[in-house]
Image (spheres, grey):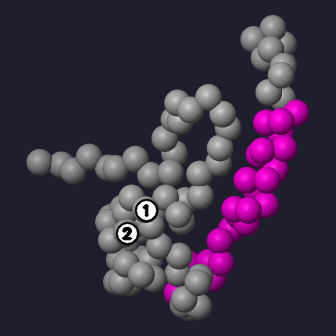
Amino acid sequence: MTAIPKPHASQVDSLPYFRVFNPVLQSRKFDSAGEHIHTWMPGLSGLPAAAILAPWEKALNLPGYPCRPLVDHAQAAGLARSVYQVTKGKDHKKESL
């Protein structure tokens, strides 16, 4: 039987307000053993759960793996919230691209 991958930090949110999920915090909360990362990132499979969720926090030097996140989550989340605030009052269905 093939395992069905668990949703990971990309689910649709039904709340009536905008929020940006932090992938590291979501992993710590819902997959603290790092099963998802162990499954889909085989290069990190040898790391313990405490290190696998955010290896850059442990200052690990992993060949072929970035030493820090490629996207600064706090900066990207702030930008996404700003864009949302600007666009939330517009009726996007009436606008054409």
Look at 21% across and 50% down and name the residue there.
Answer: 3
Look at 84% across and 44% down and name the residue there.
Answer: 82
Mark 2 lies on a secondary structure that is loop
Whole-angstrom CA distance, mark 2 to mark 1, is 6 Å
Horizontally, residue 71 falls left or right of residue 51, namely right
Residue, disc 1: 29
State the residue in front, 77 or 59.
Answer: 77
Q: Is residue 24 above or below residue 17?
A: below
Q: Position of residue 15 (x, y in %)?
A: 56, 32
Residue, disc 2: 32
State the residue in front, 16 or 40.
Answer: 16
**Which residue is at the far front?**
16
Look at 79% across and 61% down and name the residue there.
Answer: 75
Q: Which residues are magenta?
A: 62-86
Q: Does the segment drawn in magenta span residue 52?
A: no
Horizontally, residue 49 falls left or right of residue 11, namely left
**Which residue is at the far top?**
94
Asked whether the viewer can see residue 40, the reply is no
Q: Position of residue 18 (x, y in %)?
A: 67, 37
State the residue in front, 16 or 61.
Answer: 16
Pointers 2 and 1 in contact (CB under 8 A)? Answer: yes
Q: Position of residue 22 (x, y in %)?
A: 59, 58
Q: Is residue 19 above or below residue 75?
A: above
Identity, as a three-letter code, of the amino acid under mark 1: Lys
- Marker count (numbered): 2
Looking at the rendered image, the quarter that the C terminus falls into is top right
